[in-house]
Structures are given as C-alpha cells and as structure tokens.
Amino acid sequence: MITHLRGRLAQANPTQAVVDVNGIGYEVTIPLSTYDRLPPAGRDVELLTQLVVREDAHELYGFASSEERDLFRLLIQRVSGIGPKTALAVLSGTPVPTFKGAVVNGDVKALASIKGVGKKTAERMIVELKDHVGVAGAWEAASVRHALPPEEQKVNDAVLALISLGWKQVEAHKLVRAALDRLGPATEVEALVRDALRAG
C-alpha cells in the first residue's frame, strides 16, 4: 500500500498531479481542494495517497490533508454506490467540515447541490454516514462557520480530540477550558489534550 508520496511536483492540473520521487513519476488523481494547495511545478511536495485497485487498473489518489483522505475513504467504503469519481466530486465541491455538517444536520439540499451528487445519493450519504461523522463533525462544521481566532481554534481542536476519544461535547469543552486556564494561552493542542485527560 502506498500511503504518501514525497518528492518534486513535476506537473499538475485541476484533476491530476505528477510527483517525481527519486526519478520515478507517480501520476495521482486529485480533487480541486488539493490542486488549490499545490506548490508551483518544480517545488517539493507531499501528498497523502489512497490506492484503489480495480480489475482493469490500479489508480492512485492524492490529497493535501488527512481530513480529505479520510473523507474519501469513508465515502468509497461506507456509502453504497459511491466510487472514487463521486468521492472526488464531493471533495472538489465542498470543504470537509461543511460536508460533515450537512450530513449531521440531514441537509439533503446542500449535499445534492454538489456536482455529481443527486438527491438520492445525498439521502444515502446522510443515512450511511451519520453515525460515522457524529457530533465531532457538527462541532467541526460550526467552528469553521464562525471563523475562530487562533486561541479558540486550539480549544476547538482539543475538544474534537476528546470527543473522538469518547467524551461528551459539553464535558470535553469544560475540561479543555480548565486546561487552558491552568497552562496559559500559548499551550499547544497536544498539551491541552494531555492535561484535560489527566483532569478528567
């Protein structure tokens, strides 16, 4: 399994990139969200990847962030009838937190407005992904909507980490706030999470 590529960006267009790794060029299919974050050709680049094996081809998909790759995997593995092409359309058509928020809130209209996703597919996404996205997805979407300042973003990231470990949202927020008060505003997310876990 190829999990990432680190090398020189040989060329790129909105749907594909070629990464030169020690003289070997890897052609990678990418979403628009990743294309927007690529450096100019000739510069160093790292892409997280997912290899999809079909009967007639082995296709490598590349992503600028783990959130993008995680959503891609979730879509192709958990939603019946969705393949890599539709998963890429989702990533190209909406930010990951916005997509998660739409799933949690049952917003069929928002999902159906993504190019390549109709009403029936949108409904299927909501039914089959709601339990996988859950409260952390709603919290993440809300934080993006409100464009949090850096200190609040740290709090938000720490809260998300605790939620993913099984804490309830309200309790996680209380623990992180208390940790921030104890350790100060310059504390990094990892230290906030460790302190909150000790206190909890």
Image (spheres, rainbow, N blue to C red):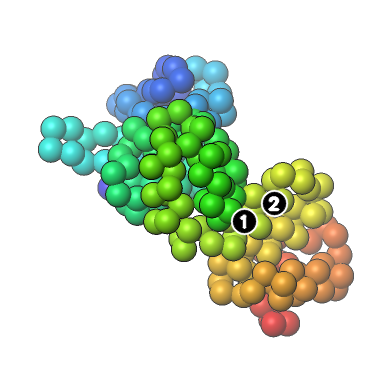
The numbered dot on residue 59 is none
Q: Of residues 168 and 126, which is closer to you in this image?
A: 126
- Alpha-carbon span between mark 2 and mark 1: 6 Å
Q: Residues within 10 Å of mark 1 (few under 14, many from 20)?
A: some
Instruction: Where is residue 141? Give x, y as percent.
Output: 64, 50
Residue under numbered circle 2: 142
Q: Amino acid at mark 2?
A: Ala
Please tell me which residue is depicted at 42% across the width and 56% down the height of the picture.
127
User: Relative to 68, is 179 above or below?
Assistant: below
Residue 110 in view, yes or no: yes
Residue under numbered circle 1: 138
* Snapshot quadrant of residue 168: bottom right
Helix, strand or loop for disc 2: helix
Give the side of residue 199 with respect to residue 53, left or right.
right
Q: Does the residue at mark 2 contact the one at mark 1 (Cβ under 8 Å)?
A: yes
Q: Amino acid at mark 1?
A: Ala
Instruction: Where is residue 163? Give x, y as percent.
Output: 61, 68
The quadrant of the picture occupied by the C terminus is: bottom right
